[in-house]
Image: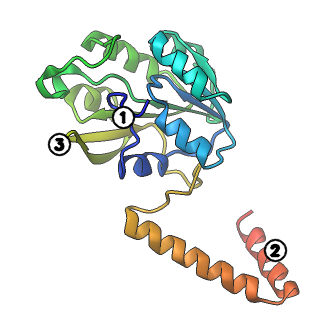
Amino acid sequence: MKNYPGQKKIYGLYHKIINQIPKHQNYYEVFAGSGAIAALLIEKNSSAKFYLNDIDGSVTDKLSCTFRQAKVSKIDATKLLNKLMAADTDTFIFMDPPYLHSTRPNNTKLYKHEMTDYDHKQLLSSVLQLDCNVMIVHPVCELYDTWLKGWRKVLIKVRYHNKMSLECLYMNYDLPEQLQVDAFLGTDCWDRQRIKRKATSLVNKLIALPELERNYIIRRVQENFA
C-alpha cells in the first residue's frame, strides 16, 4: 500500500519515529493503514509480536495478505484501546489517526472512515487511561497539545506532495534507554553514517585482537552494561 494517504514511510520521518520506540514485547498499530512502521520493524528483525488494526475492511484484507506474522483486527480504535487498559510497558501502541480536518490543506477528505473532533476527544480520553507506552503522530494543534499536556514531544517537518506540515510525536514515556530497533540510530543521514563508521571501526579493532584478549574485553563490556 505504497500510495496509502498519510503513510509514514517517508525518508527522514520513519527514522525519527523508530528512534523513539522503546523496547517492548507487543506492538499495536491502532490505525494501521499501510502498516509502514510495523513493516520496517519486522524488516529490521524486531522480536515483538505484532497486532495491526484498522476499521476499514479493505485495508485489513490487504494487511492480512502482507503481514502473515501479525494478528490483524477490524474494530473501532477506542474499543481496542479499552481492551488494552490492563496492558503494561511490555506493550507499545503506535497511533497515526486520521488527522483533524482543520489541520489538513483544504480540509480534504482522505479516508473511508473519517474522525470528527468529538471522535478525537473520545480517543484521547481512552488513551489517557492507558498504562502502556503510547506514541501518537499528529500535526501540531491546540486540541492535541491541550489533551496531551505533559507528554514528551518531538517536532518534525514533513513534506507531503509539496506541502510542508509540522507534525508532532506525542509520547507518554521518557526518552528510551534501549530501542526496539537501532538500525536507524542518528539524527540524520550524516549522523547515522558517523555512528555506523564508528561501530565498524570498533568491531574491526576487536576482531583483530587475540581471541583471549577479545573475549576478556567482551566479558568486561557485558559486566558493565548488565
Please report contact status of discs 3 and 2: CB closer than 8 Å, yes or no. Answer: no
Q: Position of residue 38 (x, y in %)?
A: 54, 36
Residue 180 image label: none
Q: Position of residue 224 (x, y in %)?
A: 72, 71
- C-alpha span from label 3 to label 2: 51 Å
Identify the residue at horizontal 59%, vertical 23% (top origin).
65
Residue at the extreme left: 106
Q: Tell me the amino acid under the disc marked 3.
A: Asn
Q: Tell me the amino acid under the disc marked 1.
A: Val
* Residue under numbered circle 3: 162
Task: Mark yes or no: residue 106 visible.
Answer: yes
Identify the residue at horizontal 83%, vertical 87% (top origin).
213
Is residue 9 rendered to the left or right of residue 110?
Answer: right
Q: Earlier in the sequence, mark 2 or mark 1?
A: 1
Residue at the extreme right: 212
- C-alpha span from label 2 to label 1: 40 Å
SS at mark 1 in the image: strand
Q: Earlier in the sequence, mark 1 or mark 3?
A: 1
Q: Tell me the amino acid under the disc marked 2.
A: Arg
* Residue under numbered circle 1: 137
Identify the residue at horizontal 67%, vertical 38% (top origin).
48
SS at mark 3 in the image: loop
For residue 204, above or below residue 51: below
Residue 219 image label: 2
- C-alpha span from label 1 to label 3: 20 Å
Identify the residue at horizontal 59%, vertical 74% (top origin).
199
Is residue 105 rendered to the left or right of residue 99?
Answer: left
